[in-house]
């Protein structure tokens, strides 16, 4: 049995519930749309608002802090390792009897190097540098260069040098008065023998020349005697029969006197030639067999001849065994350097040694060579003259040559021509000092240096005295104002 009246109320209730759900959905959608619109509205800017939001912030000064620290100033450059006092080396003349006509014993043959010198050799007094035609070329100490053969009768400073060298080598010449005598000749012979050579004795050509000169003297003497004898015979032939000579006799006498004078002059010339030859006859030192060097030991730096060459020009270069470093620094840096400053030298592979500044091409040091670290400071980048050195160069960028001696080269001794980093300490602060970047230094119209200090948003000027500078940092001392570490100074606007 059906009950229709009971089904109707149940259907009405379902429709009411469904309507309420639809209404809730609609309300929620409206709320979401409204919220989205509000959010979008808050993100949209007008053109004026957008331009205002992209404007740069208000400009302010660029500042850095004042720092209290120790400061060391150095000049840094690149140099090259060299040996001191280079000088050309050449022979003053022939070795042995020279390049004259060849004799049976080979003397006088063309000069040829038979043992070449060796680059890098350390030369001591008495050493044989090389041989030419089998004969030695010795090195001796002396300031006067060899310029002639030394033998009997020669005298001068070069002979004195030879005699002193012989004495140092242990061969007493019997005196050092500067005249080559028998004692010097004996010492020379003994010295050559000790080295395995024979001293240069008269050659066969010399002996022949001596004989020729002696014969010339004898012939001149004979001519003079004959001429004088003839005068005596003419005088006795007159028999004293006439107390006065005839005109013809007077003419003969004049002719005879001329003949006698001529014969006497010939004899004098022959004797002079013989004496001059004997002055260099005997044991001698040929011009090419000794090289005098101002200082020994020395170093044979470069060699320009080889075995078989004719040693007619420069045979090489000799240097002192002392090591030096040659560097070039800008003129402004060179003004800071003084004789005696210490230089640290470092090669690319880490080898190092210490040297001493010896010569600065434009040195303005005082006569006693002293200098003050603060006086040799620089204030590069400023117009202030405080703390600058005396002296100036017309072109601060022009290179100035600096020579550094190296008393104990150590590992640099074998580094000839190597590049080295040169660091020369030119000043140091007295303990910790106030420092600022050099960009913070300004110069007033009165020439005084000043810095701008930012304090509580306000910039205050403080006058300072600048001191040592290094690596873009400069020492400052407040001049009548306050300045302390931690405060900030203006380096840019």
Image (spheres, grey):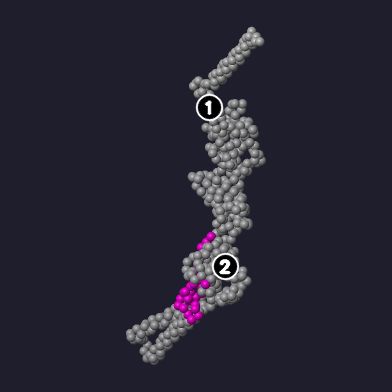
Instruction: Answer with the quarter of the image where residue 251 lies.
Output: bottom left
Question: Which residue is painted at 56% across and 58% down in the image?
Answer: 416
Nearest the viewer among 417 and 183 is 417
Residue 140, disc: 2
* x and y, in percent, of residue 12 in the image: 62, 10
Classify the position of the N terminus by image quarter. Answer: top right
Vertical comparison of 155 with 441: above or below: below
Residue at the limit of the structure toward the top, as seen here: 5
Vertical comparison of 426 with 178: above or below: above
Please, what secondary structure does the residue beneath circle 2 have? strand
> Which of the two labelled residues, at mark 1 and mark 2, occupies the earlier sequence position?
1
Vertical comparison of 426 with 446: above or below: below
Nearest the viewer among 436 and 212 is 436
Q: Which residues are magenta?
A: 86-114
Please, what secondary structure does the residue beneath circle 1 have? loop
* x and y, in percent, of residue 314 in the image: 49, 65
Question: Which residue is painted at 61% across and 52% down in the image?
Answer: 350
- Distance between the alpha carbons at the discs numbered 1 and 2: 83 Å
Badge 2 density bin: few <14, some 14–19, many ≥20, Cα 10 Å? many
Which of labels 1 and 2 is toward the front? 1
Classify the position of the C terminus by image quarter. Answer: top right
User: What main secondary structure does the magenta stretch of the protein show?
Assistant: loop
Nearest the viewer among 168 and 20 is 20
Residue holding disc 1: 56
The answer to whether residue 369 is visible is no
Relative horizontal placement of residue 14, taking residue 206 as reference (left or right): right
Question: Which residue is painted at 59% across and 67% down in the image?
Answer: 125
Q: Is residue 190 magenta?
A: no
């Amino acid at each position: 049995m059906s009950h229709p009246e009971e089904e109707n109320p149940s259907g009405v209730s379902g429709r009411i519930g469904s309507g309420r759900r639809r209404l809730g959905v609609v309300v929620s959608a409206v709320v979401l749309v409204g919220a989205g619109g509000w959010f979008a509205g808050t993100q949209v800017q007008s053109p004026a608002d957008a331009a205002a939001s992209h404007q740069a912030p208000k400009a302010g000064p660029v500042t850095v802090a004042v720092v209290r620290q120790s400061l060391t100033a150095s000049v840094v450059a690149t140099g090259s390792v060299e040996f001191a006092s280079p000088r050309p080396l050449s022979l003053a003349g022939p070795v042995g009897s020279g390049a004259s006509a060849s004799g049976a014993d080979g003397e006088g043959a063309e000069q040829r190097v038979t043992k070449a010198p060796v680059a890098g050799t350390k030369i001591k007094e008495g050493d044989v540098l090389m041989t030419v035609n089998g004969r030695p070329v010795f090195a001796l100490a002396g300031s006067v260069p060899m310029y002639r053969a030394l033998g009997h009768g020669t005298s001068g400073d070069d002979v004195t040098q030879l005699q002193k060298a012989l004495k140092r080598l242990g061969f007493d010449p019997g005196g050092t008065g500067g005249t080559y005598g028998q004692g010097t000749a004996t010492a020379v012979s003994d010295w050559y023998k000790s080295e395995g050579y024979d001293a240069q004795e008269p050659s066969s050509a010399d002996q022949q020349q001596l004989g020729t000169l002696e014969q010339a003297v004898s012939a001149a003497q004979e001519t003079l005697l004959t001429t004088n004898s003839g005068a005596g015979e003419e005088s006795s032939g007159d028999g004293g029969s006439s107390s006065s000579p005839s005109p013809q006799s007077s003419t003969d006498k004049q002719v005879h006197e001329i003949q006698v004078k001529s014969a006497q002059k010939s004899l004098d010339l022959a004797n002079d030639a013989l004496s001059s030859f004997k002055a260099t006859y005997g044991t001698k030192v040929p011009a090419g067999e000794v090289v005098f060097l101002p200082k020994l030991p020395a170093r044979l730096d470069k060699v320009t001849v080889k075995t078989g060459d004719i040693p007619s020009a420069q045979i090489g270069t000799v240097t002192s065994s002392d090591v030096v470093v040659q560097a070039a620094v800008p003129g402004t840096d060179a003004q800071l350097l003084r004789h005696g400053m210490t230089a640290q030298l470092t090669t690319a592979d880490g080898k190092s040694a210490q040297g001493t500044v010896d010569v600065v091409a434009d040195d303005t040091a005082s006569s006693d060579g002293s200098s003050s670290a603060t006086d040799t400071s620089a204030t590069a980048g400023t117009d202030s003259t405080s703390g600058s050195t005396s002296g100036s160069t017309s072109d601060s960028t022009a290179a100035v040559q600096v020579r550094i001696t190296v008393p104990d080269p150590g590992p640099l001794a074998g580094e000839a021509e190597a590049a080295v980093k040169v660091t020369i300490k030119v000043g140091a602060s007295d303990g910790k000092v106030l420092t600022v970047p050099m960009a913070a230094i300004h110069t007033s119209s009165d020439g005084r240096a000043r810095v701008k200090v930012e304090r509580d948003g306000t910039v205050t000027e403080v006058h300072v005295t600048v001191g040592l500078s290094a690596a873009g940092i400069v020492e400052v001392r407040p001049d009548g104002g306050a300045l302390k570490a931690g405060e900030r100074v203006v380096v840019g606007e």
